[in-house]
Amino acid sequence: MLGIHGDGDEINKFVAELYNKIRPHFVTASFLSNISEKTNESGGGLEHLQETLLSEMGEEVRTKIGSTFKGSSEIKQRLGQKRVLLVLDDVDNIQQLDSLARRMDWFGPGSRIIITTRYEDVLDDHILNNCVEVKKYCIAEGSSSTVKEENVVGLEKDFEIVINQLKEEDSPGNVVSIVGMGGLGKTTLARKIYNSDEVKMLFPCRAWATVSKDYSGKEVFKSLFKCLKPSASKFEDSSSEEELKQKVKKCLEGKKYLVVLDDVWDSKAWRTIKNCFPENNNGGMILVTTRNDQVAYVSESKKPHHKLSFMDKERSWELFHKEVFCRRNCPPELESIGRSIVETCKGLPR
């Protein structure tokens, strides 16, 4: 199973292209789009989606399934020996996954299940509840590339330093900053921390928002609320910026939370967002990534502010080798050219 999480239209474009490219390699296939919408009563519910899945896989469904339990049994019985390709698009809760693809033994050897969701926690719940292996990717809004966390290079020491700052409850302030120029890996490091098992244990409540240069306060609060209240956030498009800010604040009150504010460009953005955090802090922490050291000072971030730098030559070669030669199957005889490139660059962004 492959889980892809993030916001924006890039996920849909990427998965549609992937589906069309690999579809010929499978006996049968199904692309179930907009699952979150189709699950509600007007969309027909999960039983209808189970019927659609079977029908698109070439299995005749003569009568209505009647219940998700029966539908799950039918899927396993009819597709258990077939090598299938299945896309589950825009999943927003674990019940949808349990009804359509609870386990890999529902499908034949060599099958591939691709799940897209706005909420990474849905994938985490699926792994935990059903003991399945899901390779997770993130597609950031406005980016056409995926980030595979196990391919991150050269952030081990940075990871340890920032985690230790987040754990310092007795020190003043509850803001930790990662500072550096664009492309150095601030977001990659923050995402690695946010998704780590250690942080999930430390902070039961987590939320992420990308701020960016041309930010909208309303969109930032909406992103945070999506993370904190996935089931309710879909109905919040009509809420004002102030209403969303108060809802985020209420969700965080009394909880030990970690909120990541990624790519904060200036102090004005910080001043706009900071009022959504409760005054009575219960061990909650805020992790800020920024190109501007002034943002770290204004937010009263713990010192020293963690500053990222370029990787050294050996780390640069390790990353270059993984990306170019291992993943893209370049011939070994080109390695000397690759080393020359790395030597010339004097270090690569992560």
Image: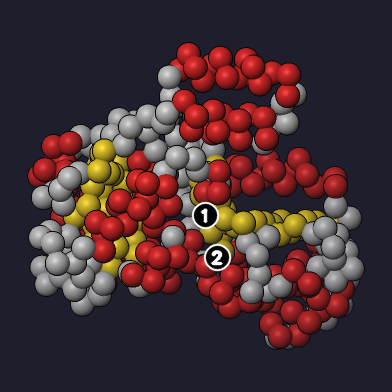
Residue at the spot x=57%, y=19% of the render? 339
> What residue sits right under mark 2 in the picture?
123
Secondary structure state at the residue bearing disc 1: strand
Q: N-terminal of the two: label 2 or label 1?
A: 1
Q: Quadrant of the N terminus?
A: bottom right
Q: Position of residue 137 (x, y in %)?
A: 55, 51
Residue at the spot x=62%, y=71% of the render? 97
> What residue sits right under mark 1 in the picture?
5
**Does residue 208 appear to the left or right of 278 in the view shown?**
right
Secondary structure state at the residue bearing disc 2: helix
Q: Is residue 207 above or below residue 309?
A: below
CA gap between label 2 and label 1 equals 8 Å
Q: Is residue 32 visible?
A: no
Q: Quadrant of the C terminus?
A: top left
Q: Is residue 218 above or below residue 58?
A: above
Q: How is the image coloured?
A: secondary structure
- What type is the residue that disc 1 sits on? His
- What type is the residue that disc 2 sits on? Leu
Q: Is residue 173 above or below residue 61?
A: above
Question: Which sits in the foreground, 60 or 68?
Answer: 68
Q: Is residue 298 above or below residue 291?
A: below
**Does residue 97 appear to the left or right of 279 in the view shown?**
right
**Does residue 350 appear to the left or right of 18 in the view shown?**
left
Q: Position of residue 347 (x, y in %)?
A: 43, 24
The reply to whether callout 2 and callout 1 are in contact (CB within 8 Å) is yes
Q: Position of residue 265 (x, y in %)?
A: 23, 37
Residue at the spot x=52%, y=67% of the render? 124
Name, please, the residue furthest toward the front.
314
Residue at the spot x=71%, y=72% of the render? 103
Question: Which sits in the foreground, 43 or 319?
Answer: 319
